[in-house]
Amino acid sequence: MTSAPPPLSDAAAFTLRRRPASEKLLDQGFHYLTLALASFVGILLLAIVLTVFQGSREAIHTFGARFITTSSWDPVNNQYGAFVAIYGTLVTSFLSLVIAVPLGVGTAIFITEDLIPAQLRNAIGLMVELLAAIPSVVLGLWAIFVMEPAIRPALNLLHTFLGWSPFFAGQAQGPGMAPAILILVVMILPIITAISRDALNQVPVELRQGAYGVGTTRWGALLNIILPAAISAITGGIMLALGRAMGETMAVTMIIGNSLNFDLSLLAPGNTIASMLANQFGEADGIQVSALMFAALILMVLTLVVNVIAQWIVRRLSLKY
Amino acid sequence: MSYSPITYDNSPLFERRPLTYSPNLARNRFNQALTGLAGVFAAIAVLPLFLVLIYVLIQGGKLLSLRLFLDLPPAPGLEGGGIGNAILGTIVVTLVASLISIPIGVGGGIFLSEYSRNGWFAQAVRFANDVLSGVPSIISGVFVYGIIVATRIIAGQSYSAMAGGIALSVLMLPTVIKTTDEGLKLVPQELRWGAYGVGASKVVTILKITLPAAFTPIATGVVLAVARAAGETAPLIFTALFSPFWPEGVFNPIASMSVLIFNFAIMPYEAQNELAWAASFVLVIMILAANLLARWISRMARP
């Protein structure tokens, strides 16, 4: 209000007050303060990328693309290749996804359909959400002392029947890729279930009514109408889970065995980028720090790409009904 | 004009079947099989929670005593001891992280919702925030190591509780911003108009009207973020490190329950393994309590 106030009749029972300069200053100041705080997110993201890139420059110069394709990790001779860790990251995350997606989507269907009483459905939903709250390191502890010894006979049964294939060669003797994959399943299951449940709940009820109206069964409607309608949001959730699985550190570190040698077998110990970082970063110096930063950069690029695709799917392909 | 006679065809348009449910039809069998499969999947999905909780409660509960909360952990190979320093350390590090991330996050959320709801800049910040929430926790540890620990920028110290808290705050920030943004969006526009109508300035409206109205969703999100941060390990391993002693201020390495669990779980000593279970017990109880608290807060607000 910069122009002069219009004349007021005496009947107006209030006095018109000009906003004092201090109040305007406060208003403006608060606006810019929140603007700065919001910008901080972008600056932080940029700072993370730059710091990791800066730290890995020495290793990028020294090793180049060889870093990705070779598998010798030799601190004595300063030769570093992260193939084992990159392979382990990709294999554990993809295989855990293969197991967790049917389980998660199936659970989501079970708790969005009216198959069981609502209280029971909500209880299952709550339990899956609480599973997501259990810290990774506690799951790792449980995996070391409870899960791995319990599933070892089953893994060895796999070896007995499928031992001819290189993927199940050698007896399971403790920590390895297979238990790591299973603990990853436990960790990403809640994400997939929660997002699939929300996606299924958002499908308009008219679609379901229409499907039932033309005489389909429950699963006819689910498979042909409801799942296709919700598939984009579910896919977004699966991509988010993939990103989480790639970057998951503690539980995997504690159960994967942290082997530096390449082994195709899922029953043998392996390694991931995240677990390599957790194990070696504290004690590394010289070019090893740079090599680890290079591995971190690769992990970050992988998860960033996966997450950006996930965001894009969720934003662009969200429900059109 | 000739009319074509309308003939009534008595043959049924559809094949007539009795309108009863026959469980033996192929499609009904298929239906039942898939329903059963979904039920089995749901049972498998809940199973790990029960198994983990049972083992943590049994194994960790064995060691529950006052000494657990008051004593220091024993040297490798020795018996007894407690996790007092780790409990205190987790509280200190989480507090540092909260003091950093809550003001920044709430402020950033206010900007997104109140000042630039659909502007290009707000959309860009939201996108960056979503990407940041997907950054693996270990990367935030590497980042803080590179920018704070290696450069000794804080009080000339390398590893410190401060560095650990900053690493955790990087993980908390996206959650706090998102819940503030979404919470403020739920506040009815009429409340803001009412405040402007009686002559309140924008800052007064936000601080006295909008923010209190959105307290419940924001508090829920913040409690969940704090609970998640308290259980994080990866960002602390090479920022806060670990310490077998009582906390010595925020500029020195500090113990935390999560790092204690990691260190002691892979030690070949029985006493240490048992302390790892006991720390898991305390941590899980704290985190589940926080989660139920958050749920309770959000239920209280619903009329």
Image (spheres, coloured by chain):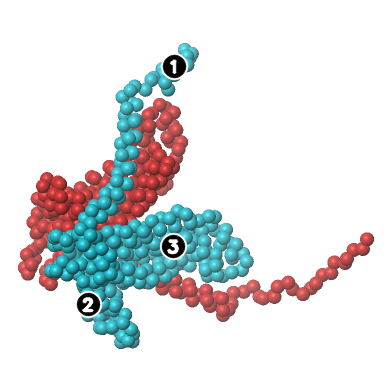
Chain colours: A cyan, B red
Relative image position of residue B101 (x, y in whole percent): 26, 46
Whole-angstrom CA distance, mark 2 to mark 3, is 34 Å
Q: Earlier in the sequence, mark 2 or mark 3?
A: 2
Q: Is residue B79 left or right of residue A131?
A: left
Instruction: Report which residue position mark 2 lands on.
Output: A174
Could you tell me if residue B177 is visible in this image?
Answer: yes
Q: Earlier in the sequence, mark 3 or mark 1?
A: 1
The structure residue drawn at horizontal position 28% and vertical position 45%, both measured from the top left corner, is B102
Q: Amino acid at mark 1?
A: Ala
The answer to whether mark 2 and mark 1 are in CB contact below 8 A is no
Which chain letter matches label 3? A
Q: Which mark is residue B278?
A: none
The structure residue drawn at horizontal position 17% and vertical position 58%, both measured from the top left corner, is B238
The label nearer to you, 2 versus 3, is 3
Of the pair A204 and A182, the residue shown nearer to us: A182
Whole-angstrom CA distance, mark 3 to mark 1, is 59 Å
Which chain letter matches label 2? A
Of the pair B136 and A209, the residue shown nearer to us: B136
Looking at the image, residue B82 lies above or below residue A20: below
Please, what secondary structure does the residue beneath circle 2 have? Answer: loop
Instruction: Report which residue position mark 1 lands on.
Output: A4
Instruction: Report which residue position mark 3 lands on.
Output: A235
Q: Amino acid at mark 3?
A: Thr
Relative image position of residue A56 (x, y in whole percent): 23, 58
Please, what secondary structure does the residue beneath circle 3 have? Answer: helix
